[in-house]
Image (spheres, helix red, strand yellow):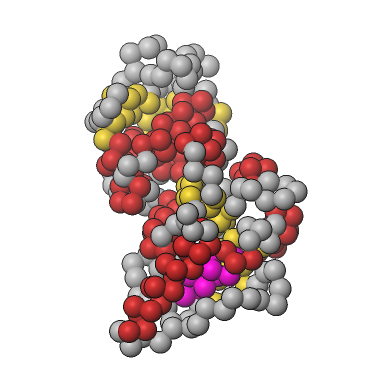
Amino acid sequence: MPHPIVVLAADLLATYSIEAARGTERRPVTSCRPAPRRTSRGAGKSPMKNSLEDRKILAIDDSPDLLDLLDAVLSREGALVTTAAGAAEGLRLFHTLRPDLVLLDLMMPGMSGWEVCDYLRQTSDVPIIILTALADARHVARGLDRGADDYITKPFVRSVLLARIRAALRRAEPLSIPAPVMTFDDGYLAIDLEHRQVLVGRAPVHLTPTEYNLLVHLVQHADRVLTYRQILKDLWGPECVDAVQYIHVYLHRLRLKLEPDPTRPRYLLTEPGVGCRFNHRPSVTPVSY
């Protein structure tokens, strides 16, 4: 099997060759760089919906070749790309730059990507996309459980990477709630979409942007079963419609934070093999506080 970097480079060069044949001028890809990190602004950007222009993206990986490739791909879309050749440098740059999104490798010497993910999620709601060669389903679940917003395995397709980045950035934006504004309050769980507040026992609960967006999506369609594919298309994008595991992971995280007994949910219910729904008339008497 070809080395992942070779596959990635071939994909990128093939894309550039096609565009060159169409007469579109593009910035050449360089194979080396004077320093392990740089911040750059792309040229020759193609118009697209949900542009990455001026979005700050931090890529953390111990492979210089992959960092060069990510820099070329994302800069071409107008992103402001900063690369870090390891976890320690990545964390330092994160605090300096406050990026809009982090691309994170898992297998790095010294501090691993798992530890970086834990730290970022404890201190920030920044969207995190894990970019790794670890393709086992257990690793995917572990990454999502630790707070990553998405998980992409190497080698990846350029167009899919860009689509997943745009989707993660969209999910991180505050939702515009259409009128009439919905609220839910049964004495135990309170959800105020207008003020973006979720309370359990009158105490505020912190949700990540992805957790909150999933909850809002279900509340806005209360008592209606939404299929897994529809939820994934609406929140993650059409390229993720088969990633049902994402829904299971985030439902589990929401139940741990919102349900009186996560093993016997009364708000966030699933229809096996079909989808899930928000039950706004729970049959169990609310807990008194």
Q: Is residue 232 visible?
A: yes
**How many numbered discs, if any?**
0
Q: Measuring 70% from the left and 77% from the top, which residue is drawn there?
A: 34
Q: Which residues are magenta?
A: 67-78
* Residue 71 lies in the magenta-colored region: yes
Q: Is residue 216 visible?
A: no
131 vs 109, left or right, is: left
281 vs 133, left or right, is: left
Most frequent secondary structure within the magenta stretch: helix
Q: In this rendered view, identify the residue nearer to me: 120 or 288.
A: 120
Q: Position of residue 181 (x, y in %)?
A: 33, 42
**Residue 60 in which image quadrant:** bottom right
Q: Position of residue 127 (x, y in %)?
A: 52, 51
65 vs 229, left or right, is: right
Q: Position of residue 63 (x, y in %)?
A: 63, 61
Q: Position of residue 152 (x, y in %)?
A: 47, 50
Q: Measuring 59% from the left and 61% from the top, which residue is drawn there?
A: 59
**Residue 93 in which image quadrant:** bottom right
* Residue 109 lies in the magenta-colored region: no
Q: Measuring 42% from the left and 55% from the top, which residue is drawn there?
A: 164
Q: In this rendered view, identify the residue nearer to me: 207 or 99.
A: 99
